[in-house]
Amino acid sequence: MGGEVYELHTERVIRETTEKVTEKVTAKVTAEVTEKVTEEVTADFKKRIAELEAKIAELEKNQKE
């Protein structure tokens, strides 16, 4: 009973196409999500730096007074 499992040509084409499309879509979505998250993190980082720079300037001003 240890026979081989055969795959119809159409089933193979569908499987291979699905695998290729899934791989491409996954790569594209991953790249888009990574870019979006990077932009958000960078914007948040810049905002925090600006806040800290303002706080430092305020502290330096108060120290001189």
Image (cartoon, grey):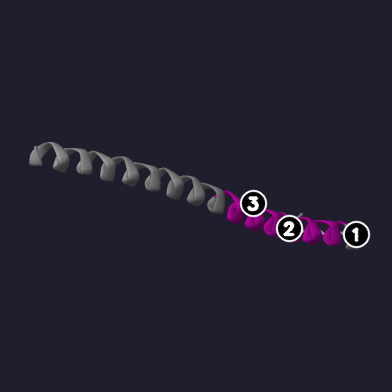
- Does any portion of residue 26 appear in the rendered image? yes
Q: Nearer the viewer, mark 1 or mark 2?
A: 2
Image location of residue 57, percent across then percent down: 22, 43
Which segment did they paint magenta? 11-33
| Point 77% across, 54% down: residue | 1
| Secondary structure predominantly adopted by residues drawn in magenta | helix
Q: Nearer the viewer, mark 1 or mark 3?
A: 3
- Does any portion of residue 4 appear in the rendered image? no
Q: Quadrant of residue 51?
A: top left
Report the amino acid beneath label 3.
Answer: Val
Q: Earlier in the sequence, mark 1 or mark 2?
A: 1
The residue at which mark 1 appears reads as 10
Depth check: give the residue in front, 11 or 17.
17
Compared across the picture, whether 14 is left or right of 31 comes to right
Q: Within 10 Å of the Cα at label 2, are there few (<14), some (14-19), or many (20+) other Cα atoms?
A: few
Report the amino acid beneath label 1.
Answer: Thr
Depth check: give the residue in front, 1 or 28.
28
Quarter holding the C terminus is: top left
Q: How many marks?
A: 3
Report the amino acid beneath label 2.
Answer: Glu
Q: Nearer the viewer, mark 3 or mark 2?
A: 3
Image location of residue 12, percent across then percent down: 83, 61
| Point 75% across, 57% down: residue | 21
* Mark pair 3, 2: CA separation: 15 Å
- The tag on residue 23 is none
Image location of residue 41, percent across then percent down: 44, 46
Compared across the picture, whether 63 is left or right of 9 comes to left
Q: Within 10 Å of the Cα at label 3, are there few (<14), some (14-19), or many (20+) other Cα atoms?
A: few
Q: Earlier in the sequence, mark 3 or mark 2?
A: 2
- The tag on residue 29 is 3
Please check the rendered image and state whether residue 12 is part of the magenta-colored stretch, yes or no: yes
Compared across the picture, whether 61 is left or right of 35 comes to left
